[in-house]
Image (cartoon, grey):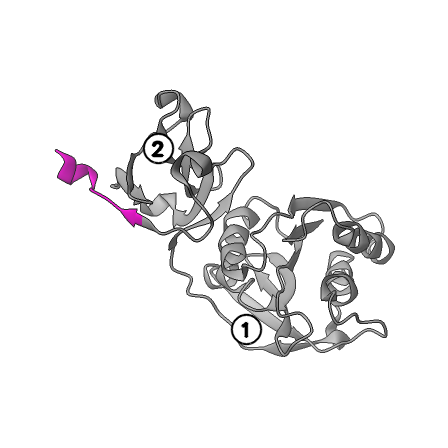
Amino acid sequence: MIVLFTDFGWQDPYVGQIKAVLAQAAAGVAVIDLLHAVPDFNAHAGAILLDALAGQFPSGSVFLCVVDPGVGGPRGSLVVEAAGRWFVGPDNGLLSIVAARADAARYWRIDWRPERLSASFHGRDLFAPVAAAIAAEAFPTDRLSAIAAPEVPFDPADLPRVVYIDHYGNAWTGLRGGLMAEQEVIEVKGQRLKRHTTFHEAAKGEAFWYVNSVGLVEIAVNRGSAAAQLGLAVGDLVRLGQTQASLH
């Protein structure tokens, strides 16, 4: 399958244009719309989200990833194989965290340039044909050169900031819940929030944090919008508060 992960949104023609290329170049391969609301131009937030989401997909999945504010400039183009999955996109850090956190990863630079290459839409003209070839089990060796590492890596450590806000107003952070076993309180925008396991445990209108379904620390309000109630935005800093031991 081919999995689409972009900051394109839904109201513009870009997703449809990419799907048209994939339908021709990888006929019969399932195309999954994972996320088209990666924070605009924010490759670092995208890299955190991609790592959190990719593990739910089977080995062999091909992720076509486009958060590319440097399109048309000197940034490179990249193919990554990590944990049995493939990732195609710009070499701007977007693919670096999922690769760095995998047990092993391999990298290729995309050397090929199609006859038609828009300066502003490499997702359609460059990345989509390469992703389609990989998904169709025709690895494009003639279009790629093996490299040791991406040119632009992000620090693979947890990111203590808001990286995504869903339509409910829940704020996903770049903190992995598995590393928060002893943590009971976090602080964001001057508000100290307790931990709950489920929404049911929180009172109506109560702001809290929990570990969400993809394993990230999420800030929420039971039957409300955390973004509106707390004034949250992507990029806001999250601080760790008292541990369970220090609360007793």
Label 1 sits on a secondary structure element that is loop
Indicate the amino acid at tag 2: Phe
Q: Residue at x 35, y 32 (%)?
A: 208
Q: Residue at x 53, y 66 (%)?
A: 93
* Left or right: residue 248 compared with residue 164: left
Q: Residue at x 52, y 65 (%)?
A: 96
Name the mark on residue 150: 1
Residue 91 seen anywhere in this rendered image of the structure? yes
Q: Position of residue 10 (x, y in %)?
A: 71, 45
* Left or right: residue 225 compared with residue 4: left
Up-down relation of residue 127 to residue 10 (above or below):
below
Up-down relation of residue 9 to residue 76 (above or below):
above
* Left or right: residue 223 compared with residue 56: left
Q: Could you tell me if the residues under marks 1 and 2 are in contact, i.e. CB atoms within 8 Å?
A: no
Q: Is residue 23 magenta?
A: no
Q: Is residue 246 magenta?
A: yes
Name the mark on residue 208: 2
Q: Position of residue 221 (x, y in %)?
A: 41, 30
Q: CA distance from mark 1 to mark 2?
A: 37 Å
> Dividing the image into 4 quarters, which one contains the C terminus?
top left
The residues colored magenta run 239-248
Q: Residue at x 49, y 36 (%)?
A: 169
- Crowding near pointer 2: few (<14 within 10 Å), some, many (20+)? many
Q: Position of residue 102 (x, y in %)?
A: 48, 59
Indicate the amino acid at tag 1: Pro
Camera-side residue of 142 and 209: 209
Question: Closer to the N terminus: mark 1 or mark 2?
Answer: 1
